[in-house]
Image: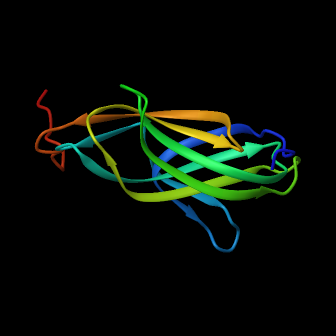
């Protein structure tokens, strides 16, 4: 795996869930977000991560790490092995995860690595909303 080139990240997004269409392999990202609101902490979350990479050819150990930026502490790690078929073709990475616990409100970061090389990061804010959101939202009087 040391001979594999370091890929470049074209896109990396966090969402509620990534769906892969069986017939075409096309990806649909449902509920793209940059922040999560919780009525209390610690709070368990479910999410999907989509990343599109180029210049990937060969075998890769893939690591996605979630860290709390307050102190760089590791919250979770997701490991996988993947194969880049050709440097001319884009490579899509899809991860759907449930049950990751955010210990407190604050800013978190998803970090993407291949073969121990850092590639990209995406941040997410976790905010405390006591009582949760009301739905439907109250109408403002003008």
Left or right of 140? Residue 112 is: right
User: Which residue is at the front of the view, 29 or 4?
Assistant: 4
Residue 42 appears left or right of 63: left
Task: Residue at 68% x, 46% y: name it.
Answer: 52
Q: Quadrant of residue 137?
A: top left
Residue 119 percent location from the top left of the image: 67, 35
Give how far across and how far down residue 77 sits, in percent: 49, 48
Residue at left offset 34%, top offset 52%: 45
Q: Position of residue 15 (x, y in %)?
A: 46, 49
Residue at far bottom of view: 23
Q: Quadrant of residue 28?
A: bottom right
Q: How many marks?
A: 0
Q: Quadrant of residue 69?
A: top left
**Looking at the image, residue 24 lies above or below residue 71:** below
Q: Is residue 106 above or below residue 54?
A: above
Q: Residue at x 26, y 41 (%)?
A: 37
Front residue of this view, candidates 139 and 95 = 95
Percent coordinates x, y for residue 19 in the rendering: 54, 63
> Which residue is pictured at 25% across the width and 48% down the height?
43
Q: Quadrant of the C terminus?
A: top left
Q: Nearer the viewer, residue 113 or 125?
A: 113
Pick the front one: 142 or 89: 89
Question: What coloring was used for the rendering?
Answer: rainbow
């Amino acid at each position: 795996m040391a001979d594999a080139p370091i890929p470049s990240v074209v896109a990396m997004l966090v969402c509620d869930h990534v769906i892969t269409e069986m017939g075409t392999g096309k990806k649909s990202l449902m509920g793209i977000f940059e922040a999560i609101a919780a009525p209390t902490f610690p709070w368990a979350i479910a999410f999907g991560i989509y990343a599109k990479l180029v210049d990937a050819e060969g075998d890769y150990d893939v690591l996605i790490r979630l860290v709390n930026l307050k102190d760089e502490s590791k919250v979770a790690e997701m490991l996988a092995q993947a194969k880049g078929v050709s440097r001319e073709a884009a490579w899509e990475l899809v991860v759907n995860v449930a049950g990751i616990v955010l210990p407190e409100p604050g800013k978190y970061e998803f970090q993407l690595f291949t073969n121990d090389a850092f590639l990209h990061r995406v941040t997410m804010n976790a905010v405390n909303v006591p009582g949760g959101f009301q739905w439907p939202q109250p109408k403002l009087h003008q």
